[in-house]
Image: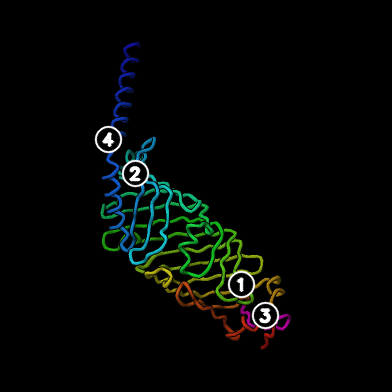
Amino acid sequence: MTRTLECCGYLLYAAAAFVCMLWLQFPAAAVKTKAESELNRLAPGLRWQIGSVGLALPADLRFSRITVSAEEKSGPPLRIDSFSLRPDFAAWRKDGSWTALWRLRLLGGSGSGRLGLNKVRSGLDYSGELHSIRLDHLGLKLLLEDFGRTLSGSLSTSFSGRQDVRRGLFAELKGEVRIEQGAVSLQEPVLGMEQLAFDQLRVKLKSQGGTLLLEDGKLESKLLAADFSGDLRLTQPAASSLVRLKGGLSPRPEFLASLGGGPMAASLLKSRLQDGRLPFTITGPLNAPGIVFSGLPVDFSSQLERGDAAP
């Protein structure tokens, strides 16, 4: 028994000494340089910078103070507080797969998931979730200056994707975005609203080349409900990306009662509803899209402001 305890003691001492040596000899500078190089290669058009790299218990590789910015634009970068990787030993024991668990913190929220080599080892497969990302966070406000609007709310998302050498980090991407208790300011009043406030917004995303498909979009608020779908053609800078949406707006009685044009405006709007919905299209650059409501005068929103809406 004593002999066994001595052996265990020696093993624990050796393991502790090995960990301390690894900690002290960890090549942080080399890992930092290699990680930045790989990230820049995986996501062309973006510039990644890592503040520091280190080890953390139990077996984590931790990156801190990460900034991401567009190569062709000077301006505030996206700041990631921390990102850590931990080998997924359970998956390796089960099927020999090379995967890691990841965790991050950014914009007041957090995320976690898994990434690793795909089955043919030609790229990366990844998946995960983000929770409680604050859309009114100062770091995001600075990024959205080019869009000329403000956002608020709490964003969460679940996603999965695949990276390959030819098509980059988002070769295949799909997921669902949810925003709770949100609001977006409008550059010009729309149907009398200077901002669109909502209780919940949900939309499914899917990448297709340089285009992001938006499917099964739903918005719920105290004043109205809406459904929409379409696509977003991504460009640099992001504010110039082209959006195309089609959908329908279902006004609630509270919305009709709040219209600035009075009973005549509400009557006109109700007469244009199709199965309780007012069809609309949104097109144009992401920082200044236009919206058209089917059957309503083009200047209907202006008429509401003046209080003289008429058929």
Q: Are circles 4 and 1 on residues that touch, CB within 8 Å?
A: no
Q: Quadrant of residue 40?
A: bottom left
Dot 3: element? helix
Where residue 196 appears, as percent x and y from the top left, is: 59, 68
Where residue 164 appears, as percent x and y from the top left, is: 29, 59
Task: Work out whether residue 80 or residue 157 is closer to the camera in this orientation and state it.
Answer: 80
Where residue 162 appears, as percent x and y from the top left, is: 34, 57
Q: Quadrant of the N terminus?
A: top left
Residue sitting at x 26%, y 55%: 122
Determine crowd level at label 2: few under 14, some 14-19, many 20+ residues with C-alpha closer than 10 A: many
Magenta-span inclusion, residue 267: yes
Judged left or right of residue 38, residue 158 is: right
C-alpha gap between disc 1 and disc 3? 21 Å
Task: Work out whether residue 215 or residue 156 is closer to the camera in this orientation and state it.
Answer: 156
Q: Which residue is mark 1?
A: 194
Depicted 2 relative to depicted 299: above or below: above
- Give the extent of the magenta segment: 261-274
Q: Are circles 4 and 2 on residues that touch, CB within 8 Å?
A: no
Dot 1: element? strand
Q: Earlier in the sequence, mark 3 or mark 2?
A: 2
Q: Which residue is mark 3?
A: 270
Dot 4: element? helix
Q: Are circles 1 and 2 on residues that touch, CB within 8 Å?
A: no
Q: Earlier in the sequence, mark 1 or mark 3?
A: 1
Q: Which mark is residue 25?
A: 4
Q: Which residue is mark 2?
A: 53
